[in-house]
Image: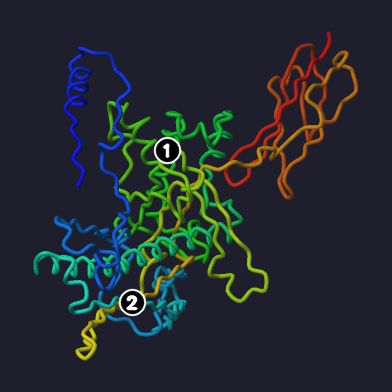
Amino acid sequence: MKVTQIYSLINSINKQMWGEDALTVTDLSGIIALGQQLQISEDDMDNYLHQIVDKVGKTVIRTLDLELDFPNLFMDTFEFGAILEKININPFDAKSNSDYNVPNVGFTPTFADISKPSISVSYFKGATTWSYTVTVPYDLFSGAFTSLEKLDSFVTAIMSALSDSMTLSVNNMSRLAIDNLIAEKVKGTNGSSNCVINLLKLYNENTTSDLTVEGALRSKEFMRFAGMIIRNYIKYMNEPSKLYNMGGMVRATARDNMHVLMLTDFASAYTTYLSSDTFHKELVEMPLYTEVNHWQGTGTDGAGVGFATNSKISIIPSSEDGEDNPTTITQNGIICVLADRQSVAVGINKRRSGVFNNNIDAYTNHKTSATIQWFNDVSENAVIFVIDSYDKDEISFDKSTLTFANSSASTQTITATVPSGQSVTWSTSKSAVATVADGVVTPVGAGTATITGTVTVDGVKYKATCAVTVGS
């Protein structure tokens, strides 16, 4: 073992720390230990793994020690059957009542009308099964440890790694179940409805701002707006409505029955740029939520530079099963998901562990297996919030200015280009200067005015303007 004398380095660092010397280049090469592969002969290795050095001294055993990322997805602890049946009982319609006619002559009572409830039934079937197995020999690597206790710790760590592998799989699959719900929502609504909300688009079009995706995460004004909208939707979804699901069902999602999943990039920005700079924190504080570091993966990006990847999914959703040319749903900028607990959950959760001892060959097989069914129900409430780029040209004019010689001049026409099926609402800033009807502008008196065309798409108003000048 090489032991390096570092007294001169310590003295130099002390002087830099105390302010006696200026900060200088400090050579740590060979001082800080970095893990490395040692050139040791096969004779010094254990006989089973051929990686552990026999009797090396102190040993540190490292495992992941994972926990479930989304424990609330697991709805039931008892065993399900092969098929999960969900029965939906729809609200009843009001009927006429003739009780007020009882005093009238000739009133004929009606007894015991039959009123059947309106129900719909969904069936969820199919589960995923997998297992992990590790073989532990009785004696082959015992020589690598200096005591029975250390050998026991090593075997225990192997079992922990086996458990971690299963937990990692469950976490990743749970994340994909959430991703599939997002993809189904984006697919079913073409990215625009009360189920998929582009907060950047909503903000820009209602504030005449031109904020970008990159700027949104650094804007206090945008953060206030985004927080207000998300908190509002949490309250809206508490009321019975058909707006927040894709099944046309009347649903209500109480806060206690709602997943609130928030991307870490957005949650951190919200706290840093807004909550930390607010005297009345309770007015802007988000409700209790679960942070999600990424929806599908981080790619090769790290914290601070990975928003584009962390907030993105690229999924062939489950509903594309059986299609000859399945469609890939890609969505960028996902920052928050509000979902009823019935919209994404685990219906079947069976996990088993077993041990097989082979006393003849002196080894033990440890096996852990899982049979789990993740399911999505798009007829339940779920709203996806994104910060994504968008096409701003929802309405445009063929003219930006109009000039009339005087109030007696002939009318001129503005042609508006709008999305298919949308109508334009026309207005003038000064009716004493010019009026407008269906794009036809009529001069009235000398001066200047602004003609505005407005179209409303998915609750967002888009405007285009034309400056009008009328001579005297």
Residue 12 in the image, given as x and y percentages of width and height: 21, 21
Relative to 401, 95 lies left or right: left
Position above or below: 308 against 116: above
Instruction: Identify the image quadrant of residue 41.
Output: bottom left
Relative to 302, 280 lies left or right: left
Q: Measure how far apart labels 1 and 2 are at the Cα level.
A: 35 Å
Judge by depth and name the residue closer to the eye, 338 or 459: 338
Residue corresponding to mark 1: 304
Judge by depth and name the residue closer to the eye, 430 or 260: 260
Instruction: Identify the image quadrant of residue 92.
Output: bottom left
Disc 1 vs disc 2: Cβ atoms closer than 8 Å?
no
In what element is the residue under mark 2?
A: strand
Residue, x 45% and y 68% (percent of image)?
A: 376
Judge by depth and name the residue closer to the eye, 35 or 415: 35
Position above or below: 71 against 192: below
Amino acid type shown at disc 1: Gly
Q: Quadrant of the C terminus?
A: top right
Residue, x 44% and y 63% (percent of image)?
A: 176
Residue 384 in the image, given as x and y percentages of width and height: 48, 52
Residue corresponding to mark 2: 370
Residue, x 41% and y 66% (percent of image)?
A: 173
Query: Which color scheme did the rendering employ for the protein?
Result: rainbow
Judge by depth and name the residue closer to the eye, 262 or 62: 62
Instruction: Identify the image quadrant of residue 328.
Output: bottom right
In what element is the residue under mark 1?
A: loop
Crowdedness of circle 1 by 10 Å Cα count: few (<14), some, many (20+)? few
Residue 324 in the image, given as x and y percentages of width and height: 67, 74
Relative to 162, 206 lies left or right: right
Crowdedness of circle 2 by 10 Å Cα count: few (<14), some, many (20+)? many
Does residue 111 appear in this view? no
Does residue 234 appear in this view? yes
Amino acid type shown at disc 2: Ala
